[in-house]
Amino acid sequence: MERVAKTRLPAAAITAIVVGGMLAACGSSSPGGAAGSGQGRANVTSGCVKSYSKGVDYFPAKVKPARAAGFEVSYHDSYEVVTVNQPYEGGKPVSYVLVQCGTPTPKLTGSLASAEVVQIPVSRVDAESTTQLPDFALLGSVGDLVGVADTAQVSTPSVIARIKARKITQFEATGTLNTEQVLATAPDLFLTQGVSNSAYAQLQASGVKVVADADYLASTPLGRAQWIEFVSLFLNKEAQAVQQYDKIASSYDRLVALAAKVTTRPTTLEGDQYKGTWYAAGGASYVGAELRDAGADYVFASDHSTGSLNLSMETILQQGTQAQFCVDADDGSYTSIKQAYTVDPRYRQLACFRNGNVWEYTKDVNSGGGNDYFEEGVVRPDLVLGDLIAIFHPSLEPHHVFTFYQKVPAG
């Protein structure tokens, strides 16, 4: 059971203001414009270079993912080499060669001899994870999406609108990737959800460019959010991605500085039990980092795991009984603290339940079960952090309007 962190200037407003201005500045460059001189150009965000000139830098806008340790990129005039250090948990590094459309494909040797070659910018994308969808919205590229895993799980408004217009197909609604449905969308690119799946090989054998997006393996909130720059590489929208990310990082860092002023850090228990097992964030996970940045004393902060902890209720009662707060209580078997006691009387032993300090990230859940915490919350960790600070230190944010979190009622 993966625990992934998926304020409030609405993302839609930020997209309209920031992306709109950037598109006017650099996203509307004509394909191959001034390619020969290399002057006054921007990355080609649609179509191909009209007249190739050797030695010209076709990527004047570049990314330098300092906080997103999960991927690296190097630029080589008309192509890029992108390496995902861990395409899935335990996986070996994999590299992709992104070639500017309209320029020659380089001769690949050595470790790149078998690398996947992708012509960019792509214009038809299948996204397997909902965490990728806000990236396309912030980059002004929702129109490039042609497939998602399960349309019912989507929370991003602009993507929902495209689904309603029947311009997006679902290919994994049953929980199993349907390769025929993927092929029917004729994608230029298939972005994985960072797992190993034998169906990917079938897609590759059919000519689909399959690329691993392993954002969930990032160990910090801003590191995970910076995967928007990874997505931008395939769209030639580095400039847009950098500007969006810098705004998000600035907002997050401001909140970290605000929370750093607190003199007391309330003890906090994260997660909840499911069928007898309590799933909590590892102390070194990005969720653990968010709790620390929000001024909380996480019960399992000393743990070195970057993923989830699978714990017994007995362990929780031993180490978390006196925790002042419980967050991310999304078990789903109860809707109030009173009802929780009927589900498992042992909840009564937890101070956070007795004190009514139980919070869950279910404020924005759609009718299909899609939770925006796992969608917008991934690329906007500043919104998540704002909620957490308001929970632990309400005096710091007295007028805060919650985006993802809500308090579990008493009964």
Image (cartoon, grey):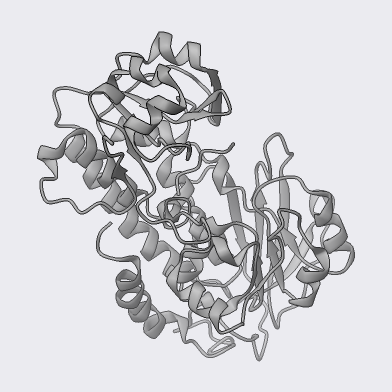
Confirm whether residue 67 shows in the render: no
Q: Nearer the viewer, residue 94 or 31?
A: 94
Residue 115's spot in the image, x, y percent? 79, 57
Residue 70's spot in the image, x, y percent? 57, 44
Location of residue 2 with respect to 311 vertically, above or below = below
Q: Residue at x 65, y 62 (%)?
A: 149
Confirm whether residue 356 shows in the render: yes
Q: How many marks?
A: 0
Figure quadrant of residue 19: bottom left
| Left or right of 329 on screen, residue 393 | left
> Which quarter shows the C terminus?
top left
Q: Nearer the viewer, residue 199 or 213?
A: 199
Residue 167's spot in the image, x, y percent? 61, 82
Q: Nearer the viewer, residue 275 or 42?
A: 275
| Left or right of 198 on screen, residue 315 | left
Location of residue 164 with respect to 84 vertically, above or below = below
Location of residue 262 with respect to 35 vertically, above or below = above
Q: Residue at x 27, y 45 (%)?
A: 387
Residue 265's spot in the image, x, y percent? 22, 23
Figure quadrant of residue 151: bottom right
Q: Residue furthest top?
A: 318
| Left or right of 366 on screen, residue 326 | left
Figure quadrant of residue 58: bottom right
> Which quarter shows the N terminus?
top right
Q: Residue at x 39, y 48 (%)?
A: 362
